Amino acid sequence: MAGNSFGKIFNLTTFGESHGEAIGGVIDGCPSGLELNLDKIQNELNRRKPGQSEIVTQRKEPDSVKFLSGIFEGRTTGTPIGFIIENANQKSKDYSHIKDVYRPSHADFTYDKKYGNRDYRGGGRSSARETACRVVAGAVAKQLISSIKINAYTSSVGDIYLEKPYQELDFNNIEENIVRCPDNDVAATMIAKIREIRKQGDTVGGTVTCVIQNVPIGLGEPVFDRLNAELGKAMLSINAVKGFEIGSGFCGTKMKGSEHNDIFNSDGSTKTNLSGGIQGGISNGMDIYFRVAFKPVATIMQKQNTIDKDGNNLEMQGKGRHDPCVVPRAVPIVEAMAALVLADYYLLNKLSKL
């Protein structure tokens, strides 16, 4: 299986399955001498871990990261940083009913056809549990680029939207509620929606908005390695993501050029920021902001028609512990992937100036 690594200079390779002994990763390319706050790394994992509230999966995992290499006396050595997160609360029997059955909109069918076998226990390698490894690496990346501020938050659940522009929000409020929406009134409506959907045995999707501030001018490369293109790839690599838009996004298609152009101030900043902080694939010093769309979780507690590996039609119903809405737990994952991209381009920019 290819495709287990991300990044050119600051590179992450992950391994492990949802119901295996452990998941883990290797971070390569992190410069030596970086003092790491391990508590901050664990806190990022705590934001993503299951069982943290009533509106997420009730799988109970401590998600404690154990570093195996690349750190000595609290500082990076410049060698590969290896780490593992042990799986402690698997209930593989919850998946025995799908051993030979393909769940609708899951990776079951495609994995089986591509590889000739699949780990049906929680989805194996296709499980979103793999994203815990990204959060660890992203937390390291955040400390490498500590002057850059990355904040993501839930901006919609189903048909409930946070309408306020991010400039009017207090990012300190993101962690004040279990849905991770910085407006408590909107958050309460979102939480009620998720509870209602869960009672129905169904799931619901939503969006995460990410804002990146204090970005230096010049990150990104022309043509194929544009910063916005890499951010798009990073976000679309996250489980359940179905859409990515940056700056004005699809709304920009309704505007005229005279309305959409960001007019310069004398210092090189712009009066508006419909470009989303990136022009020509290169950061321009303005805030980078984008939105990521997450589909409803595919496993639902309702009966559905499907097929088995022999093509027989049958009826199935989801079992086990699953998120009714993945969006609240996806917030730290979006931040982590953004941090990996920016750390990579930060190091590439330094290298290009040698």
Image (spheres, grey):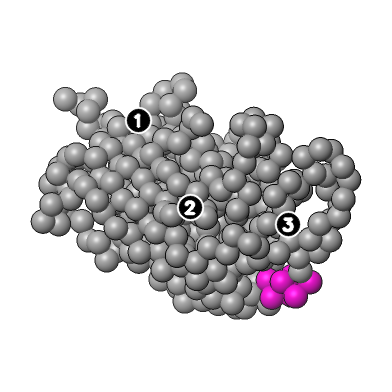
* C-alpha distance separating marks 1 and 2: 28 Å
Q: Name the residue furthest right.
A: 313
Query: Seen in the image, is 133 located left or right of residue 127?
Result: left
Tell me the quadrant of the picture where the C terminus can be found.
top left
Assess disc 3: are there few (<14), some (14-19) or many (≥20) residues with their C-alpha within 10 Å of its C-alpha: few
Q: Are marks 3 and 2 in contact (CB under 8 Å)?
A: no
Instruction: Give the residue type that dot 1 points to.
Output: Lys
Q: In terms of depth relative to the viewer, which is nearer, 98 or 195?
A: 98
Residue 190: image tag: none
Residue 8: image tag: 1
What residue is shown with label 2?
A: 20
Q: Upstream in the sequence, badge 1 or badge 2?
A: 1
Where 55 sits versus 119, above or below? below
Q: Upstream in the sequence, badge 3 or badge 2?
A: 2
* Main secondary-structure element of the magenta-colored stretch: helix
Q: Quadrant of residue 208?
A: bottom right
Q: In terms of depth relative to the viewer, which is nearer, 302 or 168?
A: 302
* C-alpha distance separating marks 3 and 2: 19 Å
The magenta segment is 194-200
Q: Secondary structure at mark 3?
A: helix
